[in-house]
Amino acid sequence: MERNQSEPIIQDELYRLALLTLKNVNNEIATSFQISFPDVERLSKKNLKASLLPITDYVPSVGNTSASTSDLVEAIKKYYVYQSWRQPYSVEDFGSQFFNKSAWFPIADVNGPIVYSSGLMEVMILGSGLTYPEHKHSPEELYIVLAGKVWWEAENSNSGWKQAGDVIHNAPNQIHSVTGGGEPVLILNLWRGGSFEMPEII
């Protein structure tokens, strides 16, 4: 039997929990992102077909969470099989390991499931030790590490480890990369100032 994406109420819950996470991390930039997203009741919905990828088997075993991220992580674990996971890169872009050990699912973007054209909200999983290599894009970006830890590097910024609950801000067109720690990593990824576009690989 074909599995369709979950009822809209599930997507609404993920959206609200993502905004609550932005509030709970107690960070000025995160708060500014939070207030830039409209109430979910003002946005339309689109049903997307659920799809899983090999790396999504690891969602239940991601690394440690924090007090500010645990509610969203538990909801992701509960509902991940209903999401439209995607791998927008090809093997030629970053190699087969990256292709097979990373994935994203949208909560809100121009194509749904919650339709939003002025930015995006999605969840990324990175396999343990996997590097999302240097890239850049025109929209401003915010990462919230939800579970696990990452090594973050960015142009004109200090590199370092970021744990669950930590905020990572990537300015428009700032070159950046992240590498997963010893366990699979979940990251809340938000853009503002532009909807989905393929990042430029450096």
Image (tube, rainbow, N blue to C red):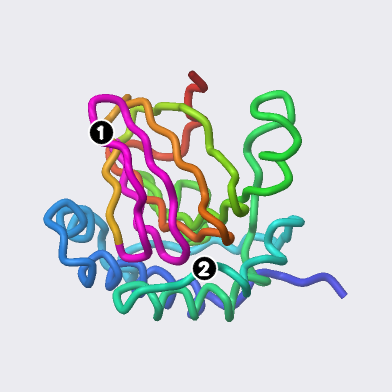
- Sequence-earlier tag: 2 or 1: 2
Residue 154 is a magenta residue: yes
**Spatial CA span between label 2 and label 1:** 27 Å
Residue 63 is a magenta residue: no
* Residue at image location 46% in from the left, 39% down from the top: 196
Closer to viewer: mark 2 or mark 1? 2
Identify the image quadrant of the N terminus.
bottom right
Disc 1 marks a residue whose amino acid type is: Ala
Q: Is residue 12 visible?
A: no
How crowded pointer 2 is (Cα within 10 Å; few <14, some 14-19, many 20+) is rated as some
Mark 2, residue position? 63
* Residue at image location 22% in from the left, 60% down from the top: 34
Q: What residue span does the magenta drawing correspond to?
A: 140-165
Disc 2 marks a residue whose amino acid type is: Gly
Please identify the residue farthest to the top as the structure is shown.
202
In this image, 81 relative to 159: left or right? right
The image position of residue 71, as x and y in percent, is 40, 80
Q: Which numbered dot is residue 137?
A: none
From what the image shows, is residue 116 above or below residue 201? below
How crowded pointer 1 is (Cα within 10 Å; few <14, some 14-19, many 20+) is rated as some
The image position of residue 135, as x and y in percent, is 46, 27
User: In what element is the residue under mark 2?
Assistant: loop
* Residue at image location 33% in from the left, 44% down from the top: 160
Q: Quadrant of residue 159?
A: top left
The image position of residue 55, as x and y in percent, is 70, 57
Mark 1, residue position? 171
